[in-house]
Amino acid sequence: MVLKGLPTVTFTLTAALGIFKIVDKQRRIYFIGNVKFHIDEVKGLGSFVEIEAIDEDGNIGLEKL
């Protein structure tokens, strides 16, 4: 997804709320069948994994949660 007004939104949010923290991370994404793995390396915090199963329609099975 590309947000065309992102610089304006970023400026507006920064002006209204300020910047409290900046998170520096690298993300790798892998798929095994319908399961999506996000592997993040966050500077100063370590490694994190997010696992997401996607149903046949391309949506997360909310009713199963």
Image (cartoon, helix red, strand yellow):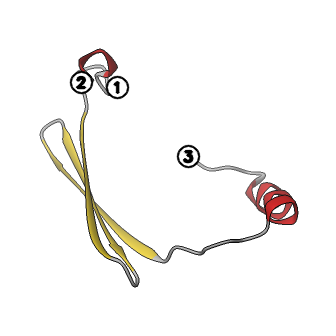
Q: Which mark is residue 59?
A: 1
Q: Amino acid at mark 3?
A: Met
Q: How many marks?
A: 3
Q: Give the alpha-carbon distance from disc 1 to disc 3, as whole Å.
A: 16 Å
In front of the other: 28 or 46? 46
Does 1 appear above or below 26?
Answer: above
Answer left or right for 62 relative to 21: left
Q: Which mark is residue 21?
A: none
Residue 52 occupies which quadrant of the picture? top left
**In the image: residue 19, left or right of residue 44:** right
**Residue contact at pointers 2 and 1, CB within 8 angstroms:** yes
Rendering coords of residue 17 (x, y %): 80, 61
Q: Position of residue 51 (x, y in %)?
A: 23, 47
- Whether label 3 touches label 2, CB < 8 Å: no
Circle 3: is it few (<14), some (14-19), or many (20+) Cα within 10 Å? Answer: few
Residue beneath label 2, please?
55
Q: Residue at x 83, y 64 (%)?
A: 11
**Amino acid type at mark 2:** Asp
Q: CA distance from mark 3 to mark 2?
A: 20 Å
Q: Name the amino acid type tagged 1.
A: Asn
Q: Quadrant of the C terminus?
A: top left
Position above or below: 62 against 50:
above
Vertical order, 17 against 1 (above or below)? below
Name the residue located 49 percent from the left edge and 77 percent from the top edge: 24
Q: Which mark is residue 1?
A: 3
Which residue is painted at 32% across and 28% down in the image?
A: 60
Callout 1 secondary element: loop
Earlier sequence position, callout 3 versus callout 2: 3
Badge 1: residue crowd in 10 Å (few <14, some 14–19, many ≥20): few
CA distance separating discs 2 and 1: 6 Å
Secondary structure beneath disc 3?
A: loop
